[in-house]
Image (cartoon, rainbow, N blue to C red):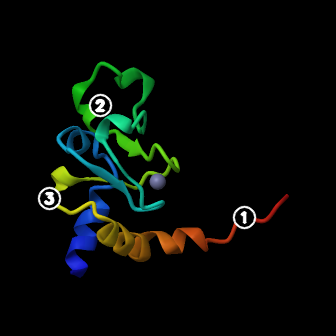
Amino acid sequence: MKNDLLVGYRFLTNNWAQIQASTACGCCNCLQTFLPVDIVAWTGLQFDDVDNPEAVARQTALCPHCGSESVLGNASGLSVDPQFLGRMNEAWFQRTIIRKPSPKT
Ligand SMILES: [Zn+2]
């Protein structure tokens, strides 16, 4: 159980190749599910690397609904149903939400 969450967390970043191979994706932040083609934004690619297939494959998907780097594809072998996304959210994202904003200067 716990292990799934750890494995899942690893798949949330540098997941371009995994997402391309997936038939369904889900977001662990907003818990929406969507198709890989719905993802229009990726992060992590340097301008110099746009022609480098390895660098392209290390990109991280941004959720088309909330913009978070928290997209899981089912090619990871993990389920992207709302239950599992909810468990991922509890395990990894609640902490992010309550992180204190930096003091205003
Ligand atoms: Zn989202």
Of all residues, the one furthest to the bottom in this rendering is 1
Left or right position of 57 against 101: left
Q: Secondary structure at mark 2?
A: helix
Q: Nearer the viewer, residue 28 or 95?
A: 28
Give the amino acid type for the residue marked by disc 2 in the picture: Val
- Between circles 1 and 3, the one closer to the viewer is 3
- From mark 2 to mark 3, how far is it between C-alphas? 22 Å
Mark number displayed over residue 56: 2
- Which badge, 2 or 3, comes first in the chain's sequence? 2
Q: Nearer the viewer, residue 2 or 102?
A: 2
Q: Quadrant of the N terminus?
A: bottom left
Residue at x 52%, y 74% (from the top left corner)? 95
Position in image of residue 54 (x %, y %): 23, 32
Task: State whether label 3 is within 8 Å of ligand 1.
Answer: no
Position in image of residue 50 (x %, y %): 35, 22
| Mark 1 neighbour density, 10 Å: few (under 14) some (14–19) many (20 or more) | few
Mark number displayed over residue 77: 3
Residue 59 lies, with reference to residue 47, above or below; the image says below
Q: Nearer the viewer, residue 90 or 55?
A: 90
Position in image of residue 64 (x %, y %): 46, 43
- Which badge, 1 or 2, comes first in the chain's sequence? 2
Quadrant of the rendered image containing residue 62: top left
Give the amino acid type for the residue marked by disc 3 in the picture: Gly
Residue at x 44%, y 23% (from the top left corner)? 47
